[in-house]
Amino acid sequence: MESWNGGQEDLADWLESLPKPVGLMAAHDLRALCVLDACRRRNIAVPEQVAVVGVDNDDVFCEVVDPNLTSISHQAEQIGYQAAALLDRLLQGKTAPAQPVMLPPRNLVPRRSTDIIAVDDVAIASALEFIRRNACAQINVSQIAQHVNLARRSLERRFVKLVGKTPHQILAEERLRRAKQLLIDTDFTLEQIAAMAGFSSSAYLSVVIREHENCTPTEFRHKTFQSGK
């Protein structure tokens, strides 16, 4: 694992010197944007040559760049709560904890800056990318096959061989991942989340969440917030 501590003017040179492909985690989203800019100026492909992850999950930073930025989301509310609790403890004349108060991150929010698919088969790699970009638009397996110019049976056989799952399973996983992310990161209603994640109804989304998480969507949202996942 390497690190970079130089000035901004040296960043592009440092990135060019790294062995590739490489993954890079920046201390915060603003620094990650500097990395993306340096890669763009030196024609370094993101994420194919350098995959980039930031920290903070600031939507303003993460969504406006191209490619948009994968980032780690903090427990901002819990950080504030713990800081206030520690201050209250000190004001009461009590001693500070012997060790730092550690809070785990809320979750990783994947976006295009790390969306590299390690499959040698060009058609299947293209199909996987198509799924990840369009799963929430209610695409189906036939549309995926048409996109990569393969017969449906051929697509399914190659998926099972190379990925270990069918295209339908990957579609379902991607939609569930998106729904869970929305449950964690937003206060949208279940109906809104179902529509945004590509589910036919909120009732069906509830069934899927219960099947995978053994709880209702509301319970999942609450327990995830409490645990900081």
Image: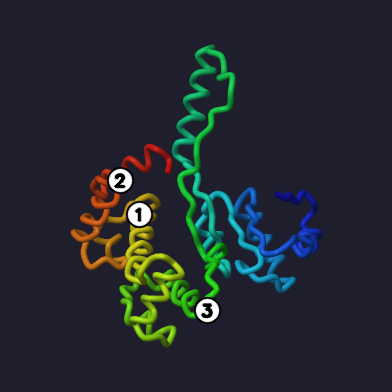
- Which secondary structure lies at badge 1? helix
Q: Are marks 2 and 1 in contact (CB under 8 Å)?
A: yes
Taking 43 as reference, is 60 left or right? left
Residue receiving disc 1 = 180
**Residue 45 — which label?**
none
User: Which of the two residues, 222 or 80, is positioned nearer the viewer here?
Assistant: 222
Q: Position of residue 224 (x, y in %)?
A: 36, 43
User: Which of the two residues, 210 or 121, is positioned nearer the viewer here?
Assistant: 121
Q: Position of residue 97 (x, y in %)?
A: 55, 20
Three-letter code for the amino acid on which mark 2 is drawn:
Phe
The image quadrant of residue 228 is top left
Residue receiving disc 2 = 220
Residue receiving disc 3 = 122
Mark toward the viewer: 3 or 2: 3
The image quadrant of residue 128 is bottom left
Three-letter code for the amino acid on which mark 1 is drawn:
Lys
User: Which of the two residues, 211 or 7, is positioned nearer the viewer here?
Assistant: 211
Give the distance between the C-alpha atoms of the residues marked 2 and 1, in whole angstroms.
8 Å
